[in-house]
Amino acid sequence: ILPSGEGLQQYTIQAPGGGMMVDPAFAGQFFAQLSPPHLVEAAMQRLVAEPPGPLANPPQVTAERWGSVRRTYIECLHDRTVPIEYQRRMLELSPGTQTVTLEADHSPFFSATEALADALIAAAKR
């Protein structure tokens, strides 16, 4: 469990060659604290830096185009990277999005594999 008041940004480091990344020594506790340890260990060895461009350039969307696409959002109740209150705020900004709630961390493909697969199959059938 993270000490009170500590967040992901405290463990973000400048990556060689540019971009930012979560220090791999601490990444598992943010991305996959409920996931099987052997999968977390293997995944954290493959972390790469996030390029700064996408975060610096806000997306350009319109109600006509964005609103015409069916959307399903899979919220993860135990996500420490994007806490549930932020996930739900994002959903408020995207009316009409169907929501599936999982008892999962930020890596539901590890922590809630079957539930995630079921949610994705159901979304694809809609």
Image (spheres, grey):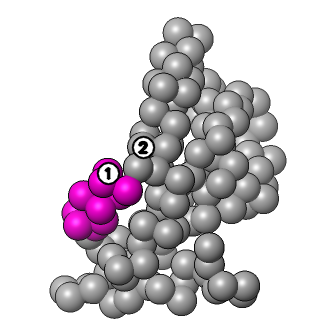
Whether residue 120 is visible to the viewer of this picture, yes or no, is no
- Quarter the C terminus occupies: top right
**Which residue position holds label 1?**
39
**Mark 2 touches mark 1? (CB < 8 Å):** yes
Residue drawn at point x = 46 percent, y = 50 percent: 35
Q: Earlier in the sequence, mark 2 or mark 1?
A: 1
Locate residue 3 relative to residue 110 in the image: left or right. Answer: right
- Residue 39 magenta: yes
**Tag 1, which secondary structure?**
helix
In the picture, the disc for residue 110 is 2
Q: Nearer the viewer, residue 17 or 60?
A: 17
Identify the amino acid type marked 1.
Leu
Residue at the (49%, 44%) spot, across then down: 111
Q: Which of the numbered marks, if any, corresponds to residue 106?
A: none
Which residue does the image show at 67% across and 31% down from the upper left? Answer: 100
Quadrant hosting residue 12:
bottom left
In the displayed structure, does residue 92 sit left or right of residue 63?
Answer: right
- Residue 86, above or below 121: below
* Vertical placement of residue 81 versus 61, above or below: below
